[in-house]
Image: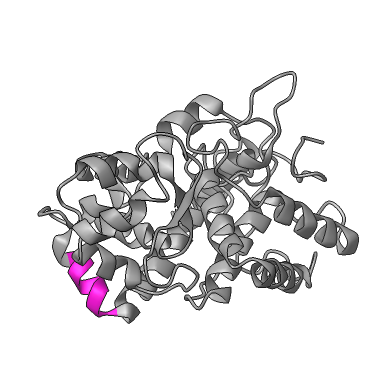
Amino acid sequence: MASSSSSFRITLSVFLVLFGMASAQLSSTYYNTSCPNALSTIKSAVNSAVSNERRMGASLLRLHFHDCFVNGCDGSILLDDNSTFTGEKTAKPNNNSVRGFDVIDTIKSKVESICPGVVSCADIVAVAARDSVYALGGPSWTVQLGRRDSTTASLSTANTDIPAPTLNLSGLITAFSNKGFTTKEMVALSGSHTIGQARCTNFRARIYNESNIDTSFASSLKSNCTSTGNDDNLSPLDTTSPTSFDNAYYKDLVSKKGLLHSDQQLYSGGSTDSQVTNYSTSSSTFLSDFANAMVKMGNLSPLTGTNGQIRTNCRKTN
């Protein structure tokens, strides 16, 4: 019985592989043999870009987030429009907002020169996000690798699945839950707003119309974000250290100085208040939870095996 049972298991596993039902797993050692200098090449390029412009660290982190929330971490956000589809770059959450594409192009070029056709754009985006956080003083984590690149993109999914800055707490919880995240992980990932800036158009309604906001903080923003016009003027998401990856974002929330409506919703008398308070007093807890949640985000529906391709140019399919 034992031998027939084991042979059945072997036959079943072969069947699953042959018919594509076994999902290939990502691996932290994926490029160890095929492109051993891939990670060091990416890190060097990210450090250079962040050194030139500290804000770029936040932009590269956001690029990964906005990629993964649209049909998984597949590099689809990098695709330019073509004759068969409209890409994600002009979706409402991305248009005139998502940046760092040129940095990814530079990294891709460097990696292609040492290992042509081996390292995916999706993996570059995932590693660049980690290296950006680390370059700004945040935690590191082990990035799982082996993603392949999509051959299409979805404007409509980008418009519906990326959480909007206008969302209330329940909407945020739902948006992240739809991607498999717990409320705790959502609050941790929101801490990415400890770096970067936001456009006036995304926080105007908050500073002019909302009551759960520090009045002097709101006043200080109004000269740069007038009631009409100045849509693209920027203000830091973290009032004290917008180019350092720390827990100041949560301290801001406790002080009612969240820039976006969706930020302050995490500390507004709801179920997540206690977690925000915890993160505001324990930087180590936040950094650890954030790193763990980022590993999970990087594992969202990757293309593996024979799905997708390794794009030579991140902006277009092969």
Task: Find residue 228 and report its image quarter.
Answer: top left
Q: In the visual, does 205 lie left or right of 274?
A: right
Q: Magenta part of the protein: which range?
A: 275-282
Chosen colour scheme: one colour
The residue at the point 29 percent across, 39 percent down is: 205
Of residues 26 and 252, the one nearer the viewer is: 252
Q: Is residue 26 visible?
A: no
Q: Position of residue 109 (x, y in %)?
A: 84, 56
Left or right for 290, reference 271? right
* Residue shown at the point (65%, 50%) measured from the top left: 122
Q: Answer above or below: position of 14 versus 47.
A: above
Residue 75 in view in this figure: yes
Where is the C terminus found, in terms of image quarters? Answer: top right
Relative to 169, does residue 213 appear above or below in the rendering?
Answer: below
Q: Position of residue 11 (x, y in %)?
A: 57, 45
Quadrant position of the N terminus in the picture? bottom left
Left/right of residue 144 with respect to residue 249 in the rendered view = right
Magenta region, main secondary structure: helix
